Image (cartoon, coloured by chain):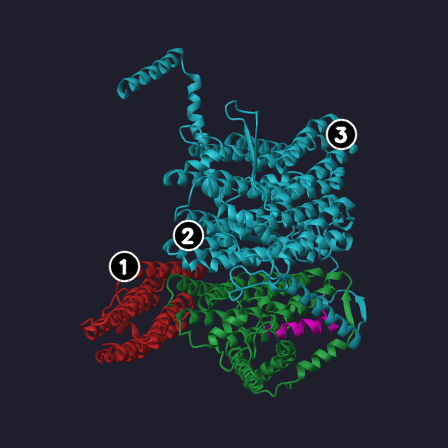
Chain colours: A green, B cyan, C red
Amino acid sequence: MILDVAVQGAQMLLVLFLAPLFTGFVRKVKARLLRRQGPPLIQPYRDLARLMRKDVVLADSASWLFRVIPYLIFAATWVAASLVPTFRTGLLFSWSADLIAIIALLGSGRFFLALAGLDVGTSFGGIGSSREVMIASLAEPAMIMIVFTLALIAGSTQLSTMAAFMASSEVGLRVSLGLALVALMMVAIAENGRIPVDNPATHLELTMVHEAMVLEYSGRHLALIELSASLKLILYVSVIACLFAPWGLASSGAGLPTLAVGIAAYAGKLAIGGFLLAVFETSIAKMRVFRVPEFLGAALMLGLLATLLRFVSGSF
Amino acid sequence: MTLTIVLVCAVVLLVFAPVAVALGRSSAATRLVYGACMLTSAVSLTAAMAHLLCAGVPESITLPVGVPWLGAHLRIDSLSAFFLVVVDLGAMSASLFALGYGQHETAPERVLPFYPAFLAAMTLVVLADDAFTYLLSWEFMSLTSWAMVMAHHRVPENVRAGYVYLVMASFGTLALLLAFGLLAGPDGLYAFAQMRAAHPSAALGALALILALIGAGSKAGLVPLHVWLPLAHPAAPSHVSALMSGVMTKVAVYGFVRIVFDLAGGPAWWWSIVVLAFAGVTTVMGVLYALMQHDLKRLLAYHTVENIGIIFIGLGLALAFKAHGMLFAAALAFTAALLHVFNHSLFKSLLFFGAGAVLTATGERDMEHLGGLIHRMPQTAFVFLVGCVAISALPPLNGFVSEWLTFQAILLSPQIPSWGLKLLVPAVGALLALSAALAAACFVKVYGVAFLGRPRTPAAEGATEVDSFSLAAMMLLASLCLLAGILPGLFIDALAPVSSALIGAHMPVQGGTQWLSIVPIAASRSSYDGLLVFLFMIISGTLAAFAIHRLASDRLRRAPAWDCGYPDASPATQYSAMSFAQPIRRVFGTVVFRAREEGFMPPPGDTRPARLTVELRDPIWDAIYAPIIVGIGFAADRLNRLQFLTIRQFLSLVFGALVILLLVLAIWT
Amino acid sequence: MNGIDFDIAHLLAGSLVLISFLELYQDRLYSLLNIYAVHALVLAASVAWQAFIQDAPHLYVTAGIALVFKAIVIPVALHRIIVRLGIHREIEKAVGVGPAMLAGIGLVALSMVVMLRVTQDADPLAREDLAFALSVVLLGLLMMVTRRNAVSQVVGFMSLENGLVLAATGAKGMPLVVEISVAFSILIAFIVVGIFLFRIRERFDTVDVQVLDRFRGERR
């Protein structure tokens, strides 16, 4: 019991502290691939600390909602990230929110972020919010279809149960799993605003979606929003890792050595995932905004196909 | 006992209708009538809740009014009790809202007499236990709401709305009449108890399903019979709109459930395919229509169409499971649908009340003329935000719970052996997920354009907070939304008797689960704990705020908006509703609505303004209603010639009819 | 039949369907040809795997033909042709990506329903592979219907033919598979040459080679 509570607490703190490191790692690998030196790995931590200490400069037309939203987004994203098994399945509170609830929590975060974009009453915020909801209107159904496929294979929507099932030998190499993996990677790219859907490093309004919504934020509010974005990225990588690469995941009731192996395996998976993400982002160009619905529509179709195959026959 | 209390309340409401006529236009009359309605609904609500929660036995009574050999049968069982709770809760909150809102009504004598009659009619529909009482109350409900739609009859679009409403309501009643006639059979067994015992054949049951779908579906708002809804609901005063959208559509759902689940016998395997197909289309079309609107109330009316689609998806799944004998799964789907009935009545009424408050404060219904209301109407803005979050199905509020339960029901469907359902259910699941995401997009638009940003017109700038009665009604509904989201187990357990009565099974008892979570099937399979999610979010949010404010900085200063260095003082440069919806309009609207955008840029030196024209075509009106209207007009023109025949031709018509009847008699006997 | 063999065969057949969808999604001719090359590659892998588990060595020859001819020779040749014809730009579609993919899903559902109902008592591995193969055939036909460009229609035809080969290898004991594959490949070659000739005729109103020489400026 004590161990369970400690593991859950460690999980929550682990994702919180690893998130900026992961973002720094991806940036470093991208820079190296472009033959630049790149910022140090701990630069995101420095950025967050610097932002936290600065004053908040609030627009005259901003409301109380604008000030509360960064905390709401952070709360929703952190709660969602704490429920994803990273080094051990069977988290203490895993039964309180299954994968559908986790996606819906991220959806709440996105809802409030889009509201923040419209709050100050500028056209930049509007452009960010309208594009974000267009992307979300296709990414979220695609994600739900992927959840359906995985739930029909694993027999449950609880993320811990699904991870345990995937780690066991009962799952074979299924077609729908392959389709779901491709669709999940496409959705993860869209939801986290990476190239080719959105450029996380730009500040040109024609190319930005996420940055446009948070244009008016400063100081500690901006720090929280950036932290939430890093948390969301690490959440998606953890979900892909625990469902499609579950090796090394400690099962519940395991002793300390197995947990240490689990943590090491998780670190390895994060490193590989970050490296692949950086390579993918460097090798492809950003899509035009109205190619994104086609991209996400393809992900939705793949998810729908995978679910359809599961409905049609148990061996797909 | 419960039945007598509820009947007495209904009679009291009916009595108040002529009283309201007598009292005339005074503001005291408004207060009196609405106050009386509120108290009566509260009493009726308590009685119905007691019956539902204590799993009371069905009571029936036969009054010697109406058709001589039939009388008026009235009955309260668990299904009626549940829908009575929905009706009375909506009525109570609408009456509370109207205590404040009704003071601003310009034509109270056109609304006040019909309002109590409307409430009484809805109560009687839910209580009716024979076809005659049912249809009489149904028509009475349509007529009283029509009268309130026509309250502001000088506005031409209200007149058109009333006309379309009347035509569609009559059509729906015709379908229901035929359905009841078929179920009553040649012996004229009009009482529901007799219909239940009669066990209709498969063909009869199928016809009853189709007719019930048409009749009840048109009142509920199923596509393609929804066309009256976005015209009529906005035309009525806001508290009446809330009742029509939030409660009357649910009474229509009650009619469907009563006919299909109770009276028409065991479902055949293909019934659910029809229901699911229409429900899936309704869900997506409703939200797509809503995204293209910028009139607040019309947008909310289209959203009602979408949510009715979600309810019918649940009902269709319940039919599918029941037809294949999977009663446990049927109970899950059925409970999900009924829970959504309850949730939707809560947050739709809340949103309509908010729209009414905005209308009172600014005089505007069009979002393009609003903006910045969060500063001027802070409490209304807060409760409206709660309503927006609830309807977008976001945790920890109640919209998410019913949608989650529907998804769990969809995940049980691969066990159904029917091929049609195996292909249809994933598609319907995708449509449901798509509509949920689009609904969130739509409500970001509504809240962001109307309440956030800067005011676009002087009307929006001069808005003030509304009176405390309206606020009290909205707060009541908002807190119920939160309660239903945090403690959904209570509501699921309350629905167990309804599910047992109609399906034959009910969901596992949620009372004993750990930390008040809900477990729809089995703990190993899925569970959700709204309370814990809510608490976690509050704790982590406050912890973060506290830690940052203590350890980092809590300084704040105001400055003009950054806007990338080019701030524009004019509020016309911020995003409007049409511009916000443009990406989605381009992705979905070009296919569904044949949306075309045309910009006109004047050449340099020309003083004309630039103009952007967006053209949308309603595909259902163009494909179904316009040809029917043209056809009817054509036929009417042709038949009009019968008016201008000579005397000889009239006589030959009569003579010919007589000869034909005699021939039929000769040949047939 | 071993579970893992079953799963790998399924995975390869399913990947073929996935790649057919990716072909439907493509905008540009170059990437379409590259994806077709991957399609043929996966087909070769699938046929080789079937050869391994069915213990039928003649299927290795079919896999080899698919690999060499369809994954390497034809894409390279088509690359050269489209550069020479100057049409290596965007594909003009008759139907947009969204409706095409929706139609694709409907076709896959249709082929599942048909195949799994018709072959109720056949070997489970063969049944489901046949269902996938029929999906690939229908998706190839869909591609031919939704494109205006002749080269992309040829690619659709070739992926249709890949589906037929998949079906043929999936049904155990089908004779003359190798011969059929060679015949199909020759047919493809003739179609490609036919396109070339068609374009020449379009441009010069003749396929007379002497006229072409005159156009090139070489006096005879």
Q: Nearer the viewer, residue A59 or C123?
A: C123
Amino acid type at circle 2 is Gly
- The residue tagged 2 is B325
User: Does B523 sit left or right of C86 as displayed?
Assistant: right
Subunit ID for the residue under disc 3:
B
Measured as percent of width and height from the top left, residue B233 is found at 61, 41
Measured as percent of width and height from the top left, residue C130 is found at 29, 66
Q: Relative to B412, does residue B240 appear above or below in the rendering?
A: above
User: Does B408 sit left or right of C115 as displayed?
Assistant: right
Q: Residues within 10 Å of mark 3 (few under 14, many from 20)?
A: some
Residue depth check, mark 2 versus mark 3: number of the one nearer the observer: 2
- The residue tagged 1 is C118
Residue depth check, mark 2 versus mark 1: number of the one nearer the observer: 2
The secondary structure that most of the magenta stretch takes on is helix
Subunit ID for the residue under disc 1:
C
Q: Point out the tag, 2 or 3, that comes first from the N-terminus.
A: 3
Subunit ID for the residue under disc 2:
B
Q: CA distance from mark 2 to mark 3?
A: 58 Å
Instruction: Please say if the residues under marks 2 and 3 sit with CB atoms less than 8 Å apart.
Output: no
Part of the protein shown in magenta? A216-233
User: Does C78 sit left or right of B299 as displayed?
Assistant: left
- The residue shown at (64%, 45%) is B49
Residue depth check, mark 1 versus mark 3: number of the one nearer the observer: 1
- The residue tagged 3 is B25
Q: Are marks 1 and 3 on the same chain?
A: no
Instruction: Please say if the residues under marks 2 and 1 sit with CB atoms less than 8 Å apart.
Output: no
